Image (cartoon, rainbow, N blue to C red):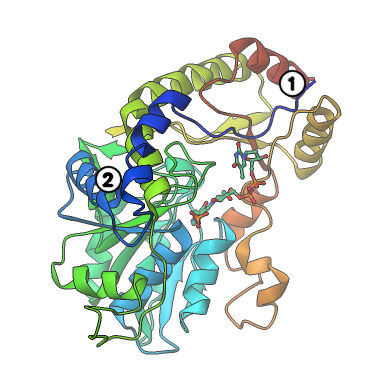
Amino acid sequence: MLPINVTRSSMPPLEEYIEEIRGLWDSHWLTNMGEKHQKFQTALEEYLKVPHVTLYTNGHLALEGILAAMNFPRGSEVITTPFTFASTTHAIVRSGLVPVFCDINDRDYTMDAAKIEALITDKTVAILPVHVYGNLCDTEAIQKIADKHGLKVIYDAAHAFGVTKNGVSAACFGDAAMFSFHATKVFNTIEGGAVCYRDDAMVQTLNDLKNFGIHGPEAVPFVGGNAKMNEFQAAMGLCNLRHLQGEIAKRKEVVKKYRELLSGYGKITFCAPQPDVEPNYAYFPVVFESEKMRDAACERLKEQNIIARKYFYPLTNDFSCYKDLPTAGGDKTPIVRSIASRVVTLPLYAELGLDEVERICKIVSE
Ligand code: T4K
C-alpha cells in the first residue's frame, strides 16, 4: 500500500500544464523574467490585492531578499518565533542578524504579541513573526508595537497563501510578507516564493537582489545574487492559481472530518478557529496531552504507513547549529516548548479520502 504522507503536492491536469508551457518550445525563453513570470506576477498582484509582488525561486531566498533589502546593520536584533521551519531562523542568521525568540500563544501558536515589548532593546530593528499553519498573527497588536518603537514588520507567510482577514489577504500586513510556493504548500509553483509589499522603492532592490544587480548588458550597479523564478515554475503557478479555491474547499472537508471525529476525544486539542479569518486549511496540527502520547501515536500511524510529521519540533532555537547562539536554548519560551513537544500535524491534502481520515482518527484515538 502506498504511504499516506503528511501532504501531497496539488497538481493541475497534465494537459492544462502542457498547454501552459507549449509556447516555451517556440520561444526557447526559459527564465530571466520571461512572459510567464510577468503574467504570474500580475495575476498574484491582482489576486492578493497588493501593490507589489516580487517572485523568487523559493520562499527562503525571498525571505533573505527582504532582509537584505531592508539593509539592517549587522548584529541587529530581530524578534521572531522558534516555532517554525528552519528557514525562518536561518534567514535571520545568514543575513548577519541576531534572532531573539518570543513565546507563542496557546490558542493558535502564533507569536504572543503581549510578550514582544519586553524583548525590545536598542539593537532591535524588526519583528519577524510567522503565520504558522496558516493561522494569522495578531497583526494589529504587532503593528502597534512596531509603530511605537519604529520597527519593521516582516511576516513569514509561507503557510498563509489564500488566507484573508476581513477580506484582506495575508500579503498586505506589515512592511513585507513572504510566501512559499514549495511543492508541499496549499499553492505551489514546484519550488517558488514571493515577497509582497507596498513600498515602491523596494521593487528595484528586490529585483537587483535576485538578478545579480544587472540593469542592462553593460550596467551592473548593485551586488546581487541569483534567485529568479523560472518559466516552468511560473506556468505551474498560473495553472494552480485557477484551481486554488477548489483545493481549499476540498481541504476544508478533510479538516471538518478530522475535527468531527477527534473532538470527542479529550486527550488532544486543536488550534482555535480565528474570528474574521478565512483560512486555507494548510495543516492540521493536533496537540496531545503528553509527549509520550504524541510519539506513540506517530509510531502507531507509521506502522500503518501513515506518516504524520512533528511540525515544528524541535524548536529552531534548539538546533545544534545554534548551540553557541546566546539568544537560543533555555527556558525563556515555556509555552512554545510545551506545544512543540506534544504537537503533530496529521496528513492533509485535497485528495485525502474521508475514509482515510476515519482510519487515521481511529488509530490516533486508540
Ligand atoms: N518559512 C516557513 C514557516 C516554512 O514552513 C518554509 C518551508 C519556509 C519558510 C521556506 O520556504 P521554501 O524555501 O521551502 O519555499 C517541507 C518543505 O520542503 C518546506 O517548504 C516547508 N516549509 C516545510 C514545512 O515542509 P520537509 O523537509 O518536511 O519536506 P519533505 O521532503 O519531508 O516533504 C514532506 C512531505 O510532502 C513528503 O512526505 C511528501 C510530500 N511531498 C514532498 C515533496 C518534496 C510531495 O507531495 N511532493 C514533493 O515534491 O520540508
Q: Nearer the viewer, mark 1 or mark 2?
A: 2
User: Measured from the top left, where is residue 207 in percent x and y?
Assistant: 27, 69
* Residue topped by disc 1: 365
Q: In the rendered structure, are the residues bearing label 1 and label 2 in contact, judged by CB atoms less than 8 Å apart? A: no
On screen, residue 129 above or below 219: above
On screen, residue 302 above or below 322: above
- Provide the secondary structure element on which disc 1 rests: helix
**In which image quadrant can residue 203 be found?**
bottom left
User: Measured from the top left, where is residue 198 in percent x and y?
Assistant: 16, 60
Q: Is residue 5 visible?
A: yes
User: What residue is rendered at 39% in x and 51% in y?
Assistant: 157
- Provide the secondary structure element on which disc 2 rests: helix
Q: Which mark is residue 152?
A: none
What amino acid does circle 1 point to? Answer: Ser
User: Measured from the top left, where is residue 38 in percent x and y?
Assistant: 23, 51
Image quadrant in which the C terminus is located: top right
